[in-house]
Image: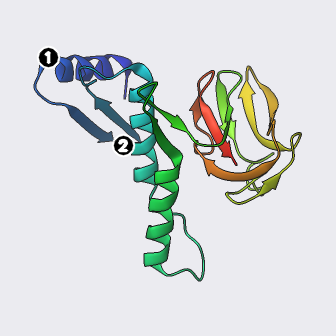
């Protein structure tokens, strides 16, 4: 989908009463959501993160009944965000590892290799969690704190922004 088409779709959504539009064309997919009045930028990011988690669905775990997987996914989603009454905005629970740069997120050292970490992996402060490719250079991202990986917030191969949450470690 070309940039002019996306811009015209954004204009269409902003000028109409439509609050959300999703278009799938060939291999591309675009989702445009109109910002709701009164929400701060951090609340919009938190809302987008929760929607992304809901789209991913519960993790596949061999030998675990579907009902237990759904219950575990609901529990993990509830733990992910807590409302800070004083600040009035959502925050991630635990130590959040954020992207130190703009680039492409990779969970493994090369295609087909095992990921550096999974949900539930125990990590130490200097363990590598992922790679971020920026300007054809692969940068290792370390945990920064010992603990257990409880959330992986980005899909393999997706672009990331500076300061975007990547992992949650408790």
**Where does residue 92 sit, x and y in percent of width and height?**
56, 38
The picture places residue 38, in percent across and down from the top left corner, at: 27, 20
In the picture of the structure, the residue carrying the numbered disc 1 is: 15
Residue 21 picture quarter: top left
In which quadrant of the rendered view does residue 13 lie? top left
Labels 2 and 1: the sequence-earlier one: 1
Is 118 above or below relative to 167? below
Label 1 neighbour load within 10 Å: few <14, some 14-19, many 20+: few
Between 48 and 156, which is closer to the camera in this rendering?
A: 48
Q: Classify residue 6 as left or right of residue 17.
A: right
Q: Nearer the viewer, residue 37 or 101?
A: 37
Q: Is residue 120 left or right of residue 141?
A: left
Residue occupying the point 38% across, 28% down: 44
Residue underneath mark 2: 26
User: SS for tag 2?
Assistant: loop
- Give the label on residue 134, or none: none
């Amino acid at each position: 989908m070309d940039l002019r088409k996306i811009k015209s779709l954004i204009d269409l959504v902003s000028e109409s009463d439509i609050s959300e539009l999703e278009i799938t064309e060939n291999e591309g997919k675009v989702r445009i959501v109109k910002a709701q009045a009164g929400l701060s930028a951090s609340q919009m990011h938190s809302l987008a993160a929760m929607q992304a988690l809901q789209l991913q669905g519960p993790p596949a775990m061999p030998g675990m009944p579907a009902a237990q997987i759904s219950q575990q996914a609901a529990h993990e989603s509830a733990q992910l965000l807590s409302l800070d009454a004083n600040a009035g905005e959502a925050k991630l629970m635990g130590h959040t590892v954020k992207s130190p740069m703009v680039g492409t997120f990779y969970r493994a050292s090369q295609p087909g290799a095992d990921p550096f970490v999974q949900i539930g992996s125990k990590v130490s402060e200097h363990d590598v969690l992922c790679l971020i490719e920026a300007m054809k250079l692969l940068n290792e991202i370390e945990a920064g704190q010992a603990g257990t990986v409880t959330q992986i917030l980005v899909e393999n191969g997706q672009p990331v922004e500076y300061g975007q949450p990547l992992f949650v470690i408790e």
